[in-house]
Image (cartoon, rainbow, N blue to C red):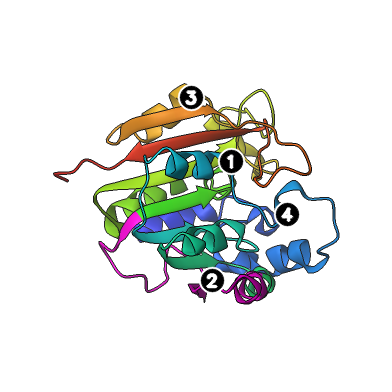
């Protein structure tokens, strides 16, 4: 399986890679200028994640922030008593996230590396939070993603996902076109039905478009993202 995945990876131009350890220089460059008007550079958690917790759908436990970037969701979860690991490909992003955690007095264990190959403890996490990772994966890497969730999540654990919404942001090309062109056009857009198909073995708890937030709001929200919460079967 690993050989097949590597072979399919090679169908993409090197510059299209946003998902493997080889992409860390690209992400380092992306995160170097903190003053860029990038919506998710703000130090605020996703409004959807906050909503799940405030409604009691998610409760403090062990969490992994997948593709944590500057750490805004990881710091938020730690502030509520979650035991948090956070991982990102970019040393620059992780350094920024560590600064934020120190400033907030939040205890987060940061890891720099590829989540697919990192030494993360199996069967450990009650929650995997992914705000912006899935939509940078080529279609075949959804298999790797599901295997990662199955390896890391406890039975009954949750996936909190934010990804590009079809009709708002991201490419809506058929999967085969990405392989013909050898690029991902900045990220893949997903519909509700496509997410339901990918996570067919999980229970859908909630799925909706993220709510846009004003600049002075304490949370982050952008309508170009879909917010979804799935639960791994308790007996799995």
Which span is picked out in magenta? Answer: 97-126
Q: Which label number is shown at residue 192? A: 3
Q: Which residue is mark 2?
A: 106
Q: Which residue is mark 4?
A: 42
Given residues 80 and 7, the one toward you in this image is 80
Distance between the alpha carbons at the discs numbered 3 and 4:
27 Å
Q: Which residue is mark 1?
A: 47
First in sequence: mark 1 vs mark 2: 1
| Image: 136 above or below 113 | above
Residue neighbourhood size for the residue with mark 4, other residues' Cα within 10 Å, grouped as few (<14), some (14–19), many (≥20): some
Question: Residue 189: percent from the left, percent from the top?
Answer: 60, 33
First in sequence: mark 3 vs mark 2: 2
Residue neighbourhood size for the residue with mark 2, other residues' Cα within 10 Å, grouped as few (<14), some (14–19), many (≥20): some
Residue at image point 27% right, 35% down = 201
- The answer to whether any part of residue 55 appears in the image is yes
- Is 101 contained in the magenta span? yes
Dot 1 falls on a residue whose secondary structure is helix
| Image: 90 above or below 51 | below
Distance between the alpha carbons at the discs numbered 2 and 4:
17 Å
Given residues 62 and 134, the one toward you in this image is 62
């Amino acid at each position: 399986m690993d050989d097949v995945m590597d072979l399919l990876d090679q169908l993409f131009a090197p510059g299209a890679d946003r998902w493997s350890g080889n992409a860390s220089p690209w992400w380092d460059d992306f995160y170097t200028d903190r003053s860029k008007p990038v919506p998710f550079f703000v130090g605020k958690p996703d409004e959807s994640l906050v909503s799940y917790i405030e409604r009691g759908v998610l409760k403090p436990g062990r969490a992994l922030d997948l593709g944590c970037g500057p750490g805004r969701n990881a710091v938020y979860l730690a502030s509520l008593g979650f035991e948090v690991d956070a991982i990102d490909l970019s040393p620059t992003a992780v350094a920024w996230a560590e600064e934020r955690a120190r400033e907030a007095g939040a205890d987060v264990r940061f890891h720099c590396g590829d989540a697919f190959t990192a030494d993360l403890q199996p069967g450990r996490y009650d929650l995997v939070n992914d705000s912006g990772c899935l939509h940078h994966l080529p279609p075949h890497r959804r298999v790797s993603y599901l295997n990662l969730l199955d390896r890391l999540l406890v039975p009954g654990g949750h996936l909190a996902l934010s990804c590009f919404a079809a009709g708002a942001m991201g490419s809506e090309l058929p999967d085969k076109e990405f392989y013909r062109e050898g690029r991902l056009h900045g990220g893949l857009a997903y519909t509700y039905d496509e997410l339901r198909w990918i996570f067919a073995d999980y229970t859908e708890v909630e799925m909706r478009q993220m709510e846009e937030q004003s600049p002075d709001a304490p949370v982050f929200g952008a309508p170009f993202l879909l917010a979804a919460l799935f639960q791994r079967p308790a007996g799995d």
